[in-house]
Image (cartoon, rainbow, N blue to C red):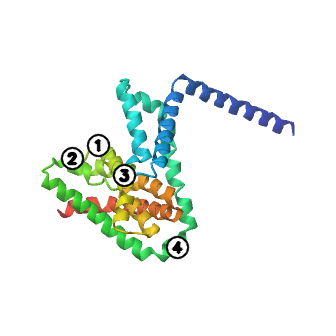
Amino acid sequence: MLWKKFLERKLKMIDQDKLYSIWVYLQAEPLFWLTLTIGSYLIADMAYKKSNLFPLLNPVAMSVLIVSLILILFDIKYERYFDGAKFIHFLLGPATVALAIPIYKKWNLIILNCKAILISLILGSTFAILITYSLSLYLELPKELIMSLLPRNVTAPIAMGISEIIGGIPSLTAIITILTGVVGASLGVFVFDVMKLKNMDARGFSLGLTSHGIGTARAMSRNKNAGVYAAVGMGLSGLLTSILVPLFLKII
């Protein structure tokens, strides 16, 4: 019993020391960048809600704009900012994995609609590749830029991996992918309204398929079922596109 108490006391001391060292590190500068990032998003989200969810005031796009303007105005390097805000970046992985929970809860519903999901997935992913390639050729873009554009329709980590394999520029692909997500999430709801698409499941799947993580977050904030289908669309789109893009390039 004595050794157990001794061990518990030591573990508490270690945890306290670790917490204190983390707090000291955060106080140096990272805490400011964390506060700036979270604060920018909260302000953008507040403006978005007060505007009655106006599509162009997407909180992700607006918070990126706020942070970017501050970095430019004060001539702050991105590396310095990211060094402080990387804790939020770290949470991206667990947040993405956590999307499996609502999918698991609605698994029976997904299986029920698997035929419609697969048809939409194949058509949507194929069309995205074809239209991107066709427009790139029409605009006479350089090959390296075309390769960077082709995987823009999937979530950034997968898109960057595909881009590197096919000869694109991963960093450029990441920017294009984020822009695609922001535009899709911002204008997607407006397009659905114009098309009079009322089915929330279809809306969610479309947002996840075309606007990946940002679209999924948007769908999740509007409707739980839409969020589930968006997560399915995002995951399957990444898987299929990683197969289709190299295959498409071999065929042409």
The residue that appears at 38% across and 29% down in the rendered structure is 71
In this rendering, the label closer to the viewer, 4 or 1: 4
Task: Name the amino acid type tagged 1.
Answer: Leu
The quadrant of the rendering that contains the C terminus is bottom left
First in sequence: mark 4 or mark 3? Answer: 4
First in sequence: mark 2 or mark 4? Answer: 4
Determine which residue is flagged by label 2: 145
The residue that appears at 43% across and 45% down in the rendered structure is 60
In this rendering, the label closer to the viewer, 3 or 1: 3
Q: Quadrant of residue 74?
A: top left
The residue that appears at 39% across and 54% down in the rendered structure is 185
Determine which residue is flagged by label 3: 181
State the CA–CA distance, disc 3 to disc 1: 14 Å
First in sequence: mark 4 or mark 1? Answer: 4
- State yes or no: discs 4 and 3 in contact (Cβ < 8 Å): no
Determine which residue is flagged by label 4: 109
Badge 1 density bin: few <14, some 14–19, many ≥20, Cα 10 Å: some
The quadrant of the rendering that contains the N terminus is top right
Task: Name the amino acid type tagged 2.
Answer: Leu
First in sequence: mark 3 or mark 1? Answer: 1
